[in-house]
Image (cartoon, rainbow, N blue to C red):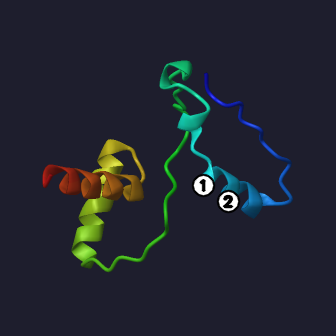
Amino acid sequence: MKKKLNIPKFKNEDAERDFWEKTDLSEHFDSKDFTYVSFPNLKPSSTAISVRIPEYLLVRLKEKAHELNIPYQTLMKQYIAQGILARH
């Protein structure tokens, strides 16, 4: 039988983070005790960046995005992701 996990009251978020970093849940739970959970509405975090591209490419990108009826930034992200994923 596994040990009962006693979770203390935390003074702050750093104390809680430290507790969870040092706690091995396998000492308290069996993997068969867990249920698969999905979070379909979570959006990946993103970071704003500046990219210099030739003006003619930006114009063509905006034209293509207009044809597809999506924002050009979205189309640019799709192109970057496709390019990266195609190389692996």
Residue 18 lies, in percent from the top left, at 67, 59
Q: State the residue in front, 43 or 32.
A: 32
Q: Taking 36 as reference, is 87 above or below it?
A: below
Q: Which residue lies furthest to the front in this view?
A: 1
Residue 3 lies, in percent from the top left, at 67, 31
Q: Determine crowd level at label 1: few under 14, some 14-19, many 20+ residues with C-alpha closer than 10 A.
A: few
Judging by the rendered image, the residue that carries numbered circle 2 is 18
Residue at figure coordinates x 83%, y 53% from the top left: 10
Residue at figure coordinates x 28%, y 61% from the top left: 61
Judging by the rendered image, the residue that carries numbered circle 1 is 21
Residue 24 lies, in percent from the top left, at 57, 44
Badge number at residue 83: none
**Kind of residue at badge 2:** Asp
Q: State the residue in front, 18 or 1.
A: 1
Could you say whether the residue bearing mark 2 is in a helix, strand or loop?
helix
Q: In this view, does 75 lie to the left or right of 44?
A: left
